[in-house]
């Protein structure tokens, strides 16, 4: 049986809550995947990937796009995406690159990054959360054989 996980990257603070809020909404909707919030060192994702066939990482991003714009990226697209992933020394892009170098990536890995605008906000913008939930649900349907696949452009989803 294929193991699929949606992992919300972030923290319980400010716009960085986006990944966690997406996971909470997916859990409330009864989405059939492993759902977890990750706030530990991102290098720990490498070990987590070993048990997965499909991983969808959800994170807040700042890239100058419209708030709520969602980027759906494969590992090889992370460097050229023009997004700021972390203000810390070792970020999401670094964790994915490490897993790739160690040949520990799941069979399929996607990063769903939603533009949050001002990263110092108290909460992530509702439009960003809605857009990310929509994108993750569509990707889960496409990757797990769900009967309710919703077509989503490969790289970007715009939600008003």
Image (tube, rainbow, N blue to C red):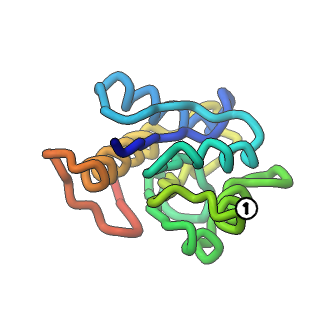
1 or 12, which lies in front?
1
Identify the residue at horizontal 67%, vertical 59% (top origin).
Answer: 99
**Image coordinates for residue 87, horizontal then vertical, percent:** 79, 52
Q: Specify whether residue 160 is in view.
A: no
Residue 3, horizontal then vertical, whole percent: 41, 42
Query: Is residue 110 rendered to the left or right of residue 136?
Result: right
Horizontal arrangement in the rendering, residue 110 relative to residue 76 (left or right): left
Comparing 48 with 8, the one in front is 48
Name the residue beneath numbered marker 1: 98
Image quadrant where one finds the N terminus: top left
Dot 1: element: helix
Please report the residue visible at 74 percent of the width from the left and 54 percent of the height from the top.
Answer: 91
Toward the top, the furthest residue is 28
Instruction: Tell me if residue 73 comes above or below residue 86 in the rendering.
Output: below
Classify mark 1: residues with Cα within 10 Å, few (<14), some (14-19) or many (20+).
some
Q: Position of residue 96 (x, y in %)?
A: 65, 60
Task: Specify whether residue 45 is in view.
Answer: yes
Q: In percent of the image, x 67 and y 50: which residue is there?
A: 46
- Residue shown at 38% from the left, 25% from the top: 27
């Amino acid at each position: 049986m294929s193991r699929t996980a949606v992992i919300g990257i972030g923290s319980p603070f400010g716009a960085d809550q986006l990944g966690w809020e997406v996971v909470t909404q997916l859990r409330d909707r009864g989405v059939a995947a492993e759902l977890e919030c990750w706030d530990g060192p991102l290098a720990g994702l490498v070990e987590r990937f070993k048990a997965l066939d499909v991983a969808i990482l959800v994170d807040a991003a700042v890239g100058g796009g419209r708030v709520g714009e969602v980027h759906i990226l494969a590992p090889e697209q992370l460097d050229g995406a023009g997004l700021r992933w972390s203000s810390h020394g070792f970020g999401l892009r670094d964790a994915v690159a490490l897993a790739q170098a160690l040949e520990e990536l799941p069979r399929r890995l996607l990063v769903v990054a939603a533009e949050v605008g001002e990263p110092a906000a108290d909460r992530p913008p509702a439009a960003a959360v809605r857009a990310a939930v929509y994108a993750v649900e569509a990707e889960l349907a496409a990757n797990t054989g769900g009967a309710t696949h919703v077509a989503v452009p490969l790289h970007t989803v715009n939600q008003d």
